[in-house]
Amino acid sequence: MKSKLPASAARLLALFAGISLSIPAHADPEFADCLNRLRAESVQRGVSLATFDAHAAPLQADRAVLGFLDAQPEFVTPIWDYMAALVDDERVADGRAMLVQWREVLERVEASYGVDPATVVAVWGVESNYGRNFGSRPLLTSLSTLSCFGRRQTYFRGEFFTTLKIIEEGHVAPERLTGSWAGAFGHTQFMPSTFMRLAVDFDGDGRRDLVDSVPDALASTANFLRRGGWRSDESWGFEVALPAGFDSTLAGRRNKRPLADWAARGVRRVDGQPLPVQGPASGLLLLAGGAGPAFLVSRNFDALYGYNAAESYALAIAHLSDRLRGGAPFVIAWPTDDPGLSRAERRTVQQLLIARGHDIGEPDGMIGARTREALKVVQAELGLTADGRAGQRVLQALKASVAPPR
Ligand code: CA
């Protein structure tokens, strides 16, 4: 009988011999070949073969994630729908509860990183709904698939190996590493590479855990913003009113001018008061043209923008932070005759669709493909434009259609 080397010794021998051991028999040979190539890169990427074999070798591809890579949004969300769901009364109330619950941690975070509690909590609320939505896709499955197939393999390989490093260093429990299809995970929805650069251990246990430690997550968010140029003595900006005939070619987040310059052009605070005399150079943000709400935004807004590279996203965080401080909704309405719905109103729409016999799953407040298809049918039945959009008009029509006859 031949003596059998322990697996680790066999691996070591193979390493010295310059041979890569193959990934075990696999239902998907193309993926298995790719895993073998990744395994050969592993050590030079800073991930031990032991870690690779324990966590990556058993992976199966999930080609469903490839669909997201090239997906063209079938439906472009208007800014008023986006804001109505991201900054609704529920998220404001939940955020205020978090400010109370995590007050002591948030005060220490502010002392360490110079970012105020409302801003940190607003990022948390928009990113993961205060830890309720982490995303449920296993990170290594998504990232290994995206490393092997599709058009951004080089980028995703970096994220894949970084995820293995996060596991190897013991920051997050491997089975807790789930997230978005692209690999954003935890309370802060950091990509693995962002985690490596910017996550911090704030609860002092030696691990940077953005999944199971709220203090680590809140401090990491503040660290992200500080490194993105956040100034503790400045605000993100504020809503403004433009004079009639304003030249909107001056708009643009990056086109920053002194407040005095904007004041000289007739821009005032939205309540009619003059602009502050002191304040950072600011750009004029118009997300729905000159007829909608207008904002002067500072470099702190740019720090929020850095989180997700979308102005609508940064405005949602900025506005939620103001609401958490007791601020009011925007004064100037979005230019639409069919305003957007809060998540509570979206659930009502879904309940009313279900009551009309449409199988759209649980009313979760998320307007997905099935809800939109049902809405098209109902809109046609109710004499509305059948565009599948959930707005106030179809909500009111649905409510009226079930009102008891008088
Ligand atoms: Ca920690």
Image: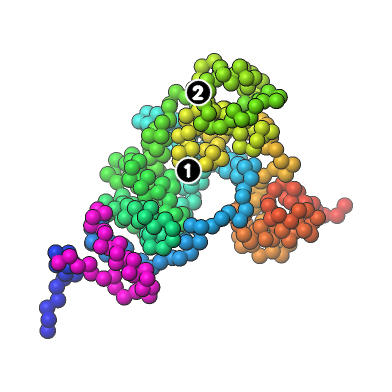
Looking at the image, is 302 positioned above or below residue 340? above
| Mark 2 CB lies closer than 8 A to ligand 1 | no
Looking at the image, which residue is at 70% across and 43% down? 339
Q: Is mark 1 within 8 Å of ligand 1?
A: no
Horizontal side of 88 relative to 59 (left or right) equals: right
Q: Which residue is mark 1?
A: 308
Q: Secondary structure at mark 2?
A: loop
Of callouts 2 and 1, which one flags the residue occurring earlier in the amino acid sequence? 2
Q: Is residue 295 visible?
A: no
Q: Which mark is residue 359?
A: none
Quadrant in which residue 354 is drawn: bottom right
Amino acid of disc 1: Asn
Q: Quadrant of residue 239?
A: top right
Residue span colored magenta: 17-46
Q: Is residue 36 on the magenta stretch? A: yes
Tell me the SS state at disc 1.
helix
The furthest residue to the top: 277
Task: Specify the amino acid type for callout 2.
Answer: Ala
- Horizontal and vertical percent for residue 108? 37, 32
Quickly name the residue at label 2. Answer: 281
Outermost residue toward the right in this view: 406
- Indicate whether residue 382 is drawn in magenta: no
